[in-house]
Amino acid sequence: MEELDASEGAGSVDITFDEAGVPTIKLSGEVDMSNVDALRRLIEPVVARAPERVIFDLASLTFMDSSGIALLLQVSAKTGTVRLRDPSALVRRMLDATGLSDVLVVDS
């Protein structure tokens, strides 16, 4: 798991691939404007492969602001489908309020 240093905010990313090569990106802690660029740099090599589908596991995510949503949309623009696994009620509300639940597919 890639941990960001404390000066960049409290967040981490863990990237795994299933047997079909589909990446799952597990975000933990907080994603906000203080660390989103560092997270983007860690995720970019996966996105550069232009996978058909990317799964974000958000079960361990404690906070995400609009910069985190923008990151998810940037990944969506470069891949086929972005699926969100176990988003918090806060993230779900943000997606519903912005109308992005049609673009970012939520898996319960």
Image (tube, rainbow, N blue to C red):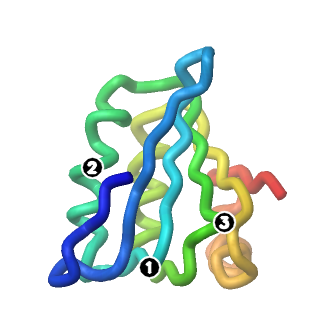
Nearer-N-terminus badge (3/2): 2
Reply above or below: 75 against 34. Answer: above
Disc 1 marks which residue? 30
Q: What label sits on residue 59 in the rendered view?
A: 3
On screen, residue 44 versus residue 75, left or right, reads: left
Which of the pair 103/62 is nearer the observer? 62
- Residue 9 pos. (x, y %): 27, 81
Question: What separation in Å lies between label 3 and label 1 (alpha carbons)?
Answer: 12 Å
Which of the pair 74/90 is nearer the observer? 90
The residue at the point 49 percent across, 36 percent down is 16
On screen, residue 37 versus residue 92, left or right, reads: left
Three-letter residue code for mark 2: Leu
Which of the pair 99/78 is nearer the observer? 78
- Using a 10 Å C-alpha cutoff, classify the residue at mark 3 as few (fewer than 14 neighbours), some (14 to 19) or many (20 or more): some
Q: Secondary structure at mark 3?
A: loop
Question: What separation in Å lies between label 3 and label 2 (alpha carbons)?
Answer: 19 Å
Reply above or below: 76 against 61. Answer: above
The residue at the point 69 percent across, 67 percent down is 87
Q: Secondary structure at mark 1?
A: strand
Three-letter residue code for mark 3: Ala
The residue at the point 49 percent across, 79 percent down is 64
Nearer-N-terminus badge (2/1): 1
Which of the pair 23/68 is nearer the observer? 23
- Using a 10 Å C-alpha cutoff, classify the residue at mark 2 as few (fewer than 14 neighbours), some (14 to 19) or many (20 or more): some
Q: Residue furthest front?
A: 1
Disc 2 marks which residue? 42
Nearer-N-terminus badge (3/1): 1
Three-letter residue code for mark 1: Glu
Q: Secondary structure at mark 2?
A: helix
